[in-house]
């Protein structure tokens, strides 16, 4: 399936098949994609043409193990914000290929995943600057409860000749309970001198003082842990302009992390 967007737009799509979305020159708007169905793999492709300013939110709604492939290309002075929210019990393999192919291109990629017992969340994420004066950034967040499995490699690339470009990334993983396994590998491939590049990585348990403070305010341990978890999923929800949808997903997220359990 393919759709083209022009001018001002706002759309919501429930998906059970591959899709390609094309954002025309100087278009502006947001798209919500809810991907589910019986397929074991789905491919979502996005092309941001010159001067457009677009936000795309994707939710993994599959109730079985799935592979999700996201492909994004940004052209001259195009700005694309793309994010995936994955709160499912099932395993998920996430592949992302972002291409900055013309000067002024800007891609911000977000992923937020909940990792539960025995359900592996595995990621291979790549964002490449092909020409000068481009900007790429990746923000990856995960929360691992008892037995959760998270394994992600994120690579920012600036090829030869792509001077005055920037490549940045952050990966933050909150680990809860025991028997979890969290691996995050930040990678920078830089083949040019006049660039800016950075990566940040944190993996660890919640701060004991934060938990104590929340519990002293009447929250159970489960609720306190859930409240701290929410902060790891908030950034991807910022891509949703529709307040009703955002509130609905926030409530779903709060239930999934145990905020309402005693």
Image: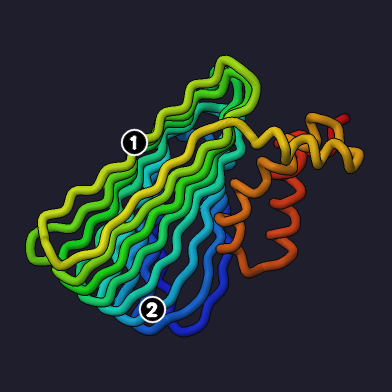
Whether residue 47 sits left or right of residue 178 in the image: it is: left
Residue at screen point 51% across, 75% down: 29
**262 lies above or below 109:** above
Q: Is residue 78 left or right of residue 196?
A: right
x, y percent for residue 246: 69, 59
Query: Of helix, strand and loop, which one carries label 2?
Result: loop
Query: Based on the displayed image, in which of its 4 quarters is residue 165 positioned?
Result: bottom left
Q: Identify which residue is drawn at 42% across, 42% down.
A: 201
The image shows residue 239 at horizontal and vertical percentages of: 56, 63
Horizontal side, residue 7 vs residue 113: left or right: left
**Disc 1 on helix, strand or loop?**
strand
Viewer-nearest residue: 49 or 171: 171
Is the C terminus in the top left, top right, bottom left or bottom right quadrant? top right
The percent position of residue 98, horizontal first and vertical second, equals 30, 55
Above or below, 262 relative to 49 = above
Which quadrant of the rendered structure holds the N terminus?
Answer: bottom left
Disc 1: CA contacts within 10 A as few (<14), some (14-19) or many (>=20): few
Can residue 255 be seen by looking at this rendering?
yes
The residue identified by callout 2 is 52
- Of circles 2 and 1, which is in front? 1
Outermost residue to the front: 209
At horizontal 44% and vertical 44% (from top left) the residue drawn is 171
Name the outermost residue toward the right.
218
């Amino acid at each position: 399936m393919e759709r083209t967007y022009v001018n001002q737009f706002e759309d919501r799509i429930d998906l059970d098949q591959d899709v390609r979305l094309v954002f025309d020159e100087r278009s502006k708007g947001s798209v919500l994609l809810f991907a589910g169905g019986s397929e074991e793999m789905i491919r979502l492709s996005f092309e941001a043409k010159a001067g457009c300013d677009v936000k795309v939110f994707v939710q993994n709604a599959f109730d079985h193990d799935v592979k999700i492939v996201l492909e994004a290309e940004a052209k001259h002075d195009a700005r694309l914000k793309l994010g995936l929210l994955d709160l499912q019990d099932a395993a998920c393999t996430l592949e992302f290929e972002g291409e900055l192919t013309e000067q002024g291109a800007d891609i911000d990629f977000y992923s937020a995943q909940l990792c539960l017992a025995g359900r592996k969340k595995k990621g291979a994420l790549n964002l490449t600057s092909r020409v000068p004066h481009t900007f790429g950034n990746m923000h990856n967040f995960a929360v691992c409860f008892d037995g959760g499995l998270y394994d992600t490699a994120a690579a920012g690339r600036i090829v030869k000749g792509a001077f005055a470009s920037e490549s940045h990334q952050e990966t933050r993983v909150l680990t809860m309970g025991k028997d979890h396994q969290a691996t995050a590998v930040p990678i920078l491939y830089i083949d040019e001198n006049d660039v800016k590049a950075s990566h940040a990585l944190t993996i660890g348990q919640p701060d004991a003082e934060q938990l104590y403070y929340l519990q002293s305010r009447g929250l159970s341990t489960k609720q306190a842990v859930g409240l701290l978890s929410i902060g790891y999923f908030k950034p991807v929800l910022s891509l949703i302009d529709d307040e009703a949808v955002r509130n609905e997903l926030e409530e779903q997220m709060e239930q999934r992390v145990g905020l309402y359990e005693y």
